[in-house]
Image (cartoon, helix red, strand yellow):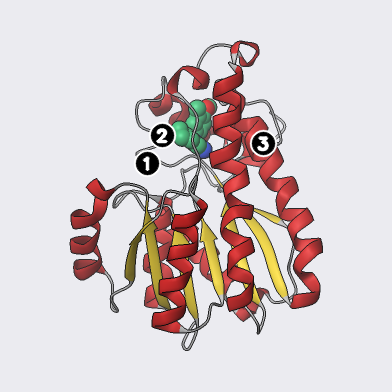
Amino acid sequence: MLQGKTGIVFGVANHRSLAWFITKALSNAGAKLAITYQDKRFEQKLKKLAEEELPDQPLALLCDIRDDAQIENVYRQLHESYGRLDFIVHSIAFASREDLEGQFIQTSRSGFLLSMEISVYSLLAVVRPALPLMEKGGSIVTLSYLGGQRVVQNYNVMGVAKAALESSVRYLAADLGEKNIRVNALSPGPVNTLSARGIKGFTGFLKHIREKAPMRRNIEGEEIGSAALFLCSDLSRGITGETIYVDAGYHIMGS
Ligand code: 1JT
């Protein structure tokens, strides 16, 4: 499905990362890939994981998305190795633990700004310098969550960030449509990742979703990988500015 295409996935932390499930799906579909990780501590583990689980070894690059120089460096290396770019997957978010419990109204200025910078601005920060490499068009995919559309207890500042992210998807889609670059979001149901772990009541939350969702189950990482593959491939060539739920139908329910 992606033979002859080149892409980059931002936000791989470990084998549970949604970015990792997406990387596997894209690699298995024949894409040439680069992956980025935030912290040098992840490097060895990720390289080993890539050797064990991917058919083709990706460029693995360090990238703190708060640093424009590191982003520039990533694209410089990508340009040298692959010469061009067809798709970008942005799977990056952050909020302080204390902002993901209690009341939204208690969110500090610094917590709010940090979450918005890392979870929202980073999308623009990784897309803008990629445009010269996307001369033949392309596909950009980011990861959202239902808490950006509805009030989901504890999601708090991340909900506000995801609302801004989904809006950013629409504005970017409008900006980039004439270059044949599409911009879309996936909105998965909750999955047990490093980000989710340690969130108060997360296990009970997964159970609640399982009981309410039309398909009576949670979502698996592979299903998010498949949806990302669709959005990165030409199968989705008529779709831009959209948020697609991958949640076993949970979001359609009223009660
Ligand atoms: C972040 C975290 C972004 C957890 C996230 C996230 N997007 C979805 N989740 C899972 C989740 C979290 C909560 C929730 C429901 C799902 C952790 C910090 C980094 C950013 O509340 C019901 C809190």
**Residue 196 position in % (x across, y down):** 41, 34
**Residue 17 position in % (x across, y down):** 37, 49
Task: Give the residue number, with chain letter if any, for mark 1.
Answer: 193
Answer with mark 3 or mark 1, whichever residue precedes in sequence.
Answer: 3
Q: Can residue 182 be seen in this view?
A: yes
Three-letter residue code for mark 1:
Thr
The residue shown at (64%, 54%) is: 124
Front residue of 77/187: it is 77
Q: Does the residue labelled 2 lie within 8 Å of ligand 1?
A: yes
Q: Is residue 6 above or below residue 125?
A: below
**Residue 186 position in % (x across, y down):** 60, 54
Mark 2 residue element: loop
104 horizontally vs 7: left or right: right
The residue shown at (81%, 75%) is: 178
Q: In this view, does 244 lie above or below 157?
A: below
Q: Which residue lies furthest to the bottom in this view?
A: 4
Q: Which mark is residue 148?
A: 3
Q: Which mark is residue 166?
A: none
Q: Which mark is residue 196?
A: 2
Front residue of 86/206: it is 86
The residue shown at (36%, 67%) is: 24
Circles 2 and 1 in contact, beta carbons < 8 Å? yes
Q: In which quarter of the image is the C terminus?
A: top right
Quadrant of the rendered image containing residue 165 = top right
Q: Give the distance between the C-alpha atoms of the residues marked 2 and 1, in whole angstroms.
A: 5 Å
Circles 2 and 3 in contact, beta carbons < 8 Å? no
